[in-house]
Amino acid sequence: MKSCLEVNKELKTAFVISILFSILFYFYEISWGLMDDYKWIVRTEEFVASPLNSYIEFQKYMVGKGTLQPFIHLQYIIQYIPGIYISPIITFIQNIFILFFSHYLLFKVMSKKLSINYYYSLMIFLIFPYTFDMFLLPSLQEKFSIPLFAYLVHRLHIAEDLKNNNLLTIFLISFIIPLVKLQGSVFVLFIFFYYLFHRSSASLSSILGFAFSISIQAYLIFFTDSGYYIVDTSSKEIIRNILSFQNLLFLLIIMLSILISFFDKNIENKYYIYGYSFSSLAIVFILINWEQYGYLYAFYAFFLCILVPYCIGRISNMIDRKSVTYSLSISLIVLTFTSSFMFFLPRIERWSDLNSVYDTLESNIFNSSVYYCASEGVLTFNNLLKENKNTVKLAGNFIDITESNFVIIKDDLQCDYLTDNIQSECILTKEFPSTFNRSQINEYSC
């Protein structure tokens, strides 16, 4: 009974914090962003106009790029159609609930075997800076692999506890996970260690499901003319990616988790942490071969929110002092608010300020060229707005701006390097203020 109440309290927390984040997004009047939103809006509208033809053509396109994602159109239907035809805020709020409940489901299945604190896990999830990118980029698909993985582990628990081996269901779930997004394939290593401990037909069926699916993805990556997941495999670039602060921190936590679990007397706990740690190493292996966009690190949060609370729990048990536990709890609370202030607040203010940029582009005709520093943002400005009276040009560097009088779309989190050069070389002649001054339109003369 007590355990049931605790679970209900944790579920209630997930619901309450989802509501709070939704209110925050509504307050800031979040609109479509500058990453993949435009492409997804166009693809969703094409799918609505011609479902079958759109699906076939997009799958051909993705296979040509070296990956297979047969379920991506479900995300169009679930997430983007309400946002396009009603309001973007619906897409963002729905995404908030998906993320917090995915975290809750992951915690729930892992905590059946591991001694981890839900609130520690939730705070670690929110402390990691890149987590917030998942809230502002609804198009990220790897988040869907988390509830599927949680459900898979739940089915494996049922198979072990009740001897109810629904092998086909377990096989199909395992087969689907890597097809949702290749990053989900890393969980095969967790299942491998799960099999080493249980030696069950259910876990073997899961491994076979993963192996079949991964072999399809591997064929597309290595035997087709594509570079979707392999951008630069030179040793210099791989070493540079590994030595980034984000990866070094992640690797340190993985190694610490393995070391601490080595002294865990519960053998099953060891296998759980070994499996989850090697899955974490696998996601690093995938990303070091790819361009290191910051938002890609967001997936790390789902690994950190399990490994770090496990380490905290083990260390707390060894020390066994209430004062240490109290100090740790206060520290995590402080870090959660600090991270939110330093990383989440600027991001949501930037997305909110885009409303002012969109309004300015739609209500003014500039005689000078309008520049922005990122290609996906240029696509958004030129194609998303219905009444855009200006053509936005790409300026990756200051030398790309050829006119002495020009307009720049300022963006503190994307184009600060460009803005700094402009401010040192040119004079600000006019600005169109935004609410938070994170993103706005300025006119300059050089």
Image (cartoon, helix red, strand yellow):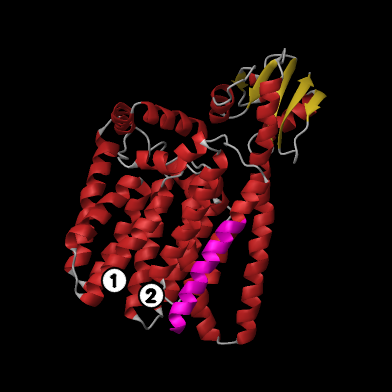
Seen from the viewer's position, the closer of residues 3 and 284 is 3
Q: How far separated are the C-alphas under marks 2 and 1?
A: 9 Å
Q: In the rendered structure, which disc, 2 or 1, sits on the residue that comes first in sequence?
A: 2
Task: Identify the residue at horizontal 30%, vertical 26% (top origin).
Answer: 53
Name the secondary structure under disc 2: loop
**Magenta-colored stretch includes residue 290:** no
Magenta residues span 1-20
**Residue designated by label 2:** 112
Badge 1 local density, few (<14 within 10 Å), some, or many (20+)?
some
**Residue designated by label 1:** 157
Badge 2 local density, few (<14 within 10 Å), some, or many (20+)?
few
Q: Which secondary structure dominates the residues rendered in magenta? A: helix
Seen from the viewer's position, the closer of residues 422 and 157 is 157
Asked whether residue 117 appears in the rendered view, the answer is no
The quadrant holding residue 128 is bottom right
Task: Identify the residue at horizontal 50%, vertical 49% (top origin).
Answer: 94
Tell me: 228 left or right of 420.
Answer: left
Task: Work out which quarter of the rendered image holds the N terminus and state it.
Answer: bottom left
Seen from the viewer's position, the closer of residues 424 and 413 is 413
